[in-house]
Amino acid sequence: MQQIFFIISRSNDFKWYASIIDFFIKKGLNVKLLYHKENLNNEKFYLKPENANINFLSKIEKIFFNNQKELKEFIIKNYEIFDYIFSIRFISGQQMFFDNFNEKISKKWCVINRGLDSFSQFDDKDIYFGETIFFSVSDYINSLGRDYIKKYHNTCLKDFDRMKKFNVGHGIFNDQLTKKVGNNKIRNLIYIPFSYSRLRFGKNSNFAFQAAYSGLNINFFWFYKSFLKKSLIKSILYFLKEKLLCLFEIIKRYPEIKKNIFSENEKEVINSIKEFCKNNDLKFITKPRLKFPFNHNLKLKCDEIIFDSEEKYLPTLFQQQLKNSCLVVGSMSHASIEAIICNIPYINIKLPDQIYMTNFSRYFHIPKENSWYNYDGVIYEKSIKEMIDSFSRKKINDFKLNKIKQKNFLSSICGIEHIDNHSIPKKIFDILNAK
């Protein structure tokens, strides 16, 4: 094993690749990055792969492609040269087919499991498995994914079962997460804001809850002008469009979301978190994702807002902040995994079931007991009402991390057996090197 390619479509692909690439370089492998310029919409403009900022990037060759056709031709032409090629996606017509070379290339095609998100690609319905190598997270994730495929995409089931799977652990894990370098005198609470998006839970879906829960209190003008760098006129037009859509959806479904307009909304959740931080002498930090407009109340209540452009890895900006934190609050976020690895309990705010409008979101994101988003003694599930009515009066010691259950969570769900010496890159290297 000498030459390895990695397909990079967005800067945040490095969330899954960075530790593997770093390890491969140190092992003396010839690593090349194939920068594929994906068509990023307005909200994702900042995720251009060339924006990534990691120490090892200066040491390796980067090849740029203007479109999928150029990338496909390059891979076919260089098939005999590289030993393996890494992707976060399966070969498919929706992503990339290699025509008569599908079978040959699949023998070298390695897919890194992105947790639950990897199974969303099965909605493409034209995946070519061949002899793809799937570096999966755990038996739990594989079983959950298999049940989803069986229920909604049964024609793929036999191919999925035949595919080579190797459990290596959750790709978000790296040794930087376990380093003790924080200032213990500083205690932070990190809040991951509600990810407002009209398309997030399914196209043409009912987004009345999103509109009432957060949309009414979002400064869309500021978001489009400051973040997306739109002109003054366009920012005003986008602002009017978003507000009118919010109001239209709220009027249309007013009886369903009346309580979210007047009481059970994100503005009040933020107020409650602020009071909790004040009562427990915590610094209130929030980390919105730049692609999602966020609640204006955060600007008024938070001690610090971290605008993460998702350029930095090993560690990420969020992982750096975890070193000085004692509690993380959010909903349906991979941040829960990073928090638990760092010995920090996580509070998952349960969202109403009716917002999940796709098979994928309904199957994977509605929290179940002892699952990804709700695990006794590790991830505390709270309703919106609970967060508003009683959270502010809680003590930080009410949210302790049960060490035995933390170990079980990391082992059974995240595939991480020993947090202090688990190396995903070494597992992958050894598997490929043994072939």
Image: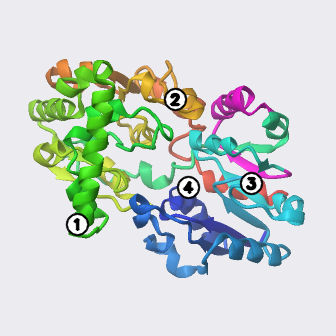
- Amino acid under label 4? Trp
Q: Residue at x 66, y 54 (%)?
A: 89
Q: Which mark is residue 16?
A: 4
**Mark closer to the chain start, 3 or 2:** 3
357, 240: nearer the viewer = 240
Left or right: residue 404 compared with residue 73 = left
- The mark that comes first in sequence, 1 or 4, is 4
For residue 333, which quarter of the picture?
A: top left
**Magenta-colored stretch includes residue 367:** no
Q: Are marks 1 and 2 in contact (CB under 8 Å)?
A: no
How many neighbours does mark 1 have within 10 angstroms: few (below 14), some (14-19), or many (20 or more)? few
**Residue holding disc 1:** 233
Image spot of residue 428 (x, y percent): 69, 54
Give the quadrant of residue 110.
bottom right
Residue carrying label 2: 409
Q: Which residue is mark 3?
A: 92
Is 151 rendered above or below residue 245?
above
Mark 2 secondary-structure assignment = helix
Check contact, mark 4 vs mark 2: CB within 8 A: no
Q: CA distance from mark 4 to mark 3?
A: 20 Å
